[in-house]
Image (cartoon, rainbow, N blue to C red):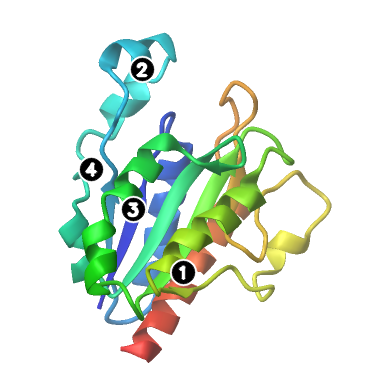
């Protein structure tokens, strides 16, 4: 069974979360995790001005996703940074290219899930996932979040992302904070949870 993890990451935070999600998927016997990134829409010059060139180069070995990849997967887990409480433009542009799949009903019944990042605790990580869910629902996907059986989302002793909507990480205003152990644990739990449900449905 194939679980496709589709992400965009400018500075590497979401990529690290994607790797943890993949680890969780592989914990379920018979499940294969495939990580792919959405196409970049910004020019190298703009990425340079944003200080993202090195991070982008470190992910050059990750294949770029195509629309057909979505139809081949049994479940799809999307990862995106927050942009004003919603998904980033790169992810939005990719999803906007899936109209043909919507016309054919190609994703109906597939499991879909979302993880995200934001600069601050209240920077829109939850609204980003909830807004993303509308696209999955329009495609007829079965939306899966991060259940409270992952107790790490209920802790109050440390700053951490994570909610019942999905795993998240807090990056800091300058991107200085990489995902914590608890946030990575949430991502792994979500990957395992999604894969387990998808396996039951296939």
Asked if the residues shown at circle 3 and circle 4 are in contact, with their CB atoms under 8 angstroms apart, the answer is: no
Q: Earlier in the sequence, mark 3 or mark 4?
A: 3
Residue bearing mark 3: 6
Residue bearing mark 4: 62
Residue at screen point 46% across, 69% down: 137
Q: Which mark is residue 16?
A: none
Which-is-in-front pick, marks 3 and 4? 3
Seen in the picture, residue 67 relative to 24 is either above or below; the reply is above
Q: Nearer the viewer, residue 2 or 93?
A: 93
Residue at screen point 46% across, 65% down: 113
Q: Position of residue 145 (x, y in %)?
A: 56, 69
Q: Nearer the viewer, residue 143 or 55?
A: 143
SS at badge 4: loop
Q: Position of residue 108 (x, y in %)?
A: 33, 77
SS at badge 3: strand
Q: CA distance from mark 3 to mark 4?
A: 11 Å
Residue bearing mark 2: 47
Binning the other alpha carbons within 10 Å of mark 1 as few (below 14), some (14 to 19) or many (20 upward) gives some
Q: Position of residue 24 (x, y in %)?
A: 43, 66
Asked if the residues shown at circle 2 and circle 1 are in contact, with their CB atoms under 8 angstroms apart, the answer is: no
SS at badge 2: helix
Binning the other alpha carbons within 10 Å of mark 4 as few (below 14), some (14 to 19) or many (20 upward) gives few
Q: CA distance from mark 1 to mark 3?
A: 17 Å
Residue bearing mark 1: 137
- Is 121 left or right of 85, judged from the image as shown? right
Q: CA distance from mark 4 to mark 2?
A: 18 Å
Q: CA distance from mark 2 to mark 1?
A: 32 Å
Quarter of the view holding residue 54: top left
């Amino acid at each position: 069974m194939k679980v496709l993890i589709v992400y965009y990451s400018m500075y590497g935070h979401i990529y690290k979360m994607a790797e943890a999600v993949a680890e969780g998927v592989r914990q379920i016997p018979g499940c294969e995790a495939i990580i792919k990134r959405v196409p970049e829409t910004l020019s190298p010059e703009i990425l340079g001005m944003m200080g993202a060139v090195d991070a982008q180069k470190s992910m050059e070995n990750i294949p770029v996703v195509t629309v057909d990849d979505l139809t081949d997967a049994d479940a799809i887990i999307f990862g995106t940074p927050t942009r004003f409480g919603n998904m980033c433009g790169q992810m939005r542009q990719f999803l906007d290219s899936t109209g043909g799949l919507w016309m054919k009903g190609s994703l109906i019944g597939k499991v879909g899930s979302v993880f995200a990042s934001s600069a601050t605790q209240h920077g829109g990580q939850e609204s980003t996932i909830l807004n993303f869910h509308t696209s999955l629902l329009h495609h007829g996907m079965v939306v899966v979040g991060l259940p409270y059986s992952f107790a790490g989302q209920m802790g109050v002793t440390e700053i951490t992302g994570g909610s019942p909507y999905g795993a998240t990480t807090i990056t800091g205003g300058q991107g200085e904070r990489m995902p914590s152990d608890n946030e990575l644990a949430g991502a792994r739990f979500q990957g395992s949870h999604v894969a387990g449900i998808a396996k039951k449905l296939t």
